[in-house]
Image (cartoon, rainbow, N blue to C red):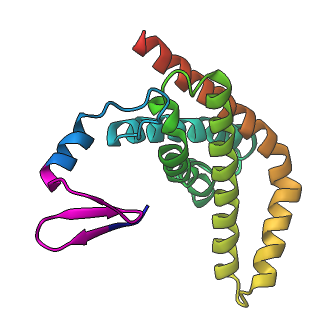
Amino acid sequence: MRLQELGDSRDVRVCGEKLSRTTSQAVQEITQQQPHPLRRAKAGMKMRLLAGLWFAVTGFVPALVSFLATSWRFHPIGSRVFVGFVIIPIPIFALCGAIIGAPILSQPQRDSGAAFAALRGIVVAALSFMLYVSTWAAIETLADYRPGVLLFGGIVFYIMAIWGSLRLFVITMIGALSGWLLYRVRFVRDN
């Protein structure tokens, strides 16, 4: 639609047709309209914060378990390896959870369900994992004496082929479970 104001009378043309009503009348009509029942609600700041915290824990727990199962004998808690494997994924998962996972809390019941929440959880986990691998590869590339795009691509391939392919499936299943649990918590709270 193309709107065009004409002069001081605040007449409005919509697709060439002149409508003569004041701005206050138009605003009043718009504000009195009820939202459509299937229209998606926007996620507020509290919902984004809750989803971010929820998925931050989702990223922290498997990272800590993985670290304790494989690396704790060689690297103490608080070491550079611990920070890289356990602490760095937390803000990445929180950011992806706040952006992608918040609609689990804000969607009306007709739009969302357990499958929607699980799918959102999978997307949050997979994207977070990919961002983590990219961050890790970027740090390793910049720490090299000859950084380059080829080196970055090689590191990403190495991490995904050796380390990531095994963990990506597990992390996405944990993400699906986390999204579903977040939905269940919301469903119990709403009812």
Q: Is residue 178 visible?
A: no
- Residue 184 spot, x, y in % from top left: 54, 17
Q: Which residues are magenta?
A: 4-24
Q: Quadrant of the N terminus?
A: bottom left
Q: Determine the residue located farthest toward the right in the rendered image.
A: 161
| Image: 113 above or below 39 | above
**Residue 8 position by quadrant:** bottom left
| Image: 6 above or below 33 | below
**Residue 120 position by quadrant:** top right
Membership of 49 in magenta stretch: no
Decide if residue 35 is on the left or right side of residue 139. left
| Image: 142 above or below 21 | below
* Residue beneath the point at 33% across and 43% down: 45
Q: Is residue 88 visible?
A: yes
| Image: 110 above or below 17 | above
* Residue beneath the point at 66% across and 73% down: 138
* Number of numbered discs on residues: 0
Of residues 26 and 172, the one drawn nearer to the viewer in this rendering: 26
Decide if residue 61 is on the left or right side of residue 16. right
Of residues 170 and 186, the one drawn nearer to the viewer in this rendering: 186
* Residue beneath the point at 72% across and 39% down: 171
**Residue 44 position by quadrant:** top left
Decide if residue 161 is on the left or right side of residue 60. right
- Residue 139 spot, x, y in % from top left: 63, 72
Of residues 110 and 159, the one drawn nearer to the viewer in this rendering: 110
Q: Determine the residue located farthest toward the front in the rendered image.
A: 17
Membership of 21 in magenta stretch: yes
Q: Quadrant of the C terminus?
A: top left
- Residue 25 spot, x, y in % from top left: 16, 47
- Residue 69 spot, x, y in % from top left: 73, 37
Q: Determine the residue located farthest toward the bottom in the rendered image.
A: 146
